Amino acid sequence: MEGMDSSRSPRQGGLLSSKNRGRIKVFVICLLISTFIWFTRALSENYESQQGVPVVLSGLRTDFTVGNDIPSHIQLSLESHGFGMIGEAFSGHNDTLFLDLSYVSAPGQYTVGIQKIRQAAAALLGKEVEITSVQPETFAVMVVKKATKRVAVEPLINADADENHFLGRAHTLPDSITVQGSESQILQINSLLTSPINLSGLRRSDTLEAGISFPPGISAEVQSVRVVIPVDEYTEKQFTLPISAPLHPEYTIKTYPDSVNVSFLCGLQEYEMIQSDMFQASVELPEVGKLEDAYKLNVVLNRQPDQISRITLNPSRVEFVLLEK
């Protein structure tokens, strides 16, 4: 047929013909060879780099500690050919520079010099990497006898409770830990704070894990504590209390009325624990010489429990008479 005479089979031409497939294979092989040659030449070149390595002093006797600040990092200038850099990058070594102080046998000031730093860095990085410079080249280590002390741990909390709920006093478990450091550092510490805890809209009590913030040179085996945050629902309670009057050298003071109604909010769990003998109400006397001219005296609470809030006194001011002694 005339139409079939002008048609062409896929095997006879087109992009994927056998002839073109051969050309593509040759192109890919050439591309791979040229890439390999470029990559090999690039890796044979020398390269320079900067690396900050954390410093840890190791081997120090358990009854010694460091009494001064030491560099947290050593800055290393490195040089290596490309293969060495790749080997160093993928070797999986520990990226911490351990400086051995096992030779220290007595308290005093010791110098960590450039030779010791270079030896530790060479052991860390391997033979393929040349260390051209270190910074700092030397630093002093003050070794002192280790002291211990038991100090309180206080929670650092910024929290508020939901409406109609009461936020109690938070505390830590344990409430104190043993810290260690130089004697001069230990004497300056009376308590430690946890890492900050920020909460809002609390409706129930909670217990969280929080890390401890340590000053420089102070350490402890315990790194975190549990923080207990008590939350309770508000309820109202009230008492009628007698009003006492402060002693006066010339008069006996009698108030009208002689009692006050005190109402307050407390947590449900503490409702039964709060009793009237935990309160004391009295009147507040004016400045000397003004008592006889006063009409009413303010009613105040001289004693009250810590775990209550929104205190209301009724009446808040009372009339009075002065009776000569």
Image (cartoon, helix red, strand yellow):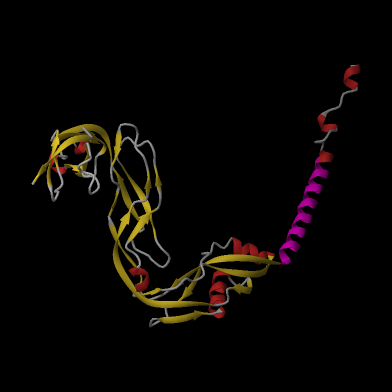
Q: Is residue 159 left or right of residue 317?
A: right
Which image quarter is the N terminus in?
top right
Q: Which residues are magenta?
A: 21-46
The image position of residue 14, as x and y in percent, is: 84, 33
Q: Is residue 113 left or right of residue 3?
A: left
The image position of residue 233, as x and y in percent, is: 27, 34
Q: Nearer the viewer, residue 295 or 94?
A: 295
Q: Is residue 304 visible?
A: no
Q: Is residue 218 visible?
A: yes
Residue at coordinates 82% horizontally, 36% vertically from top-left? Answer: 17
Residue at coordinates 67% horizontally, 65% vertically from top-left? Answer: 83
Q: Is residue 23 highlighted in magenta?
A: yes
Q: Quadrant of residue 273?
A: top left
Residue at coordinates 77% horizontally, 59% vertically from top-left? Answer: 38
Q: Is residue 254 left or right of residue 297?
A: left
Q: Quadrant of residue 301?
A: top left
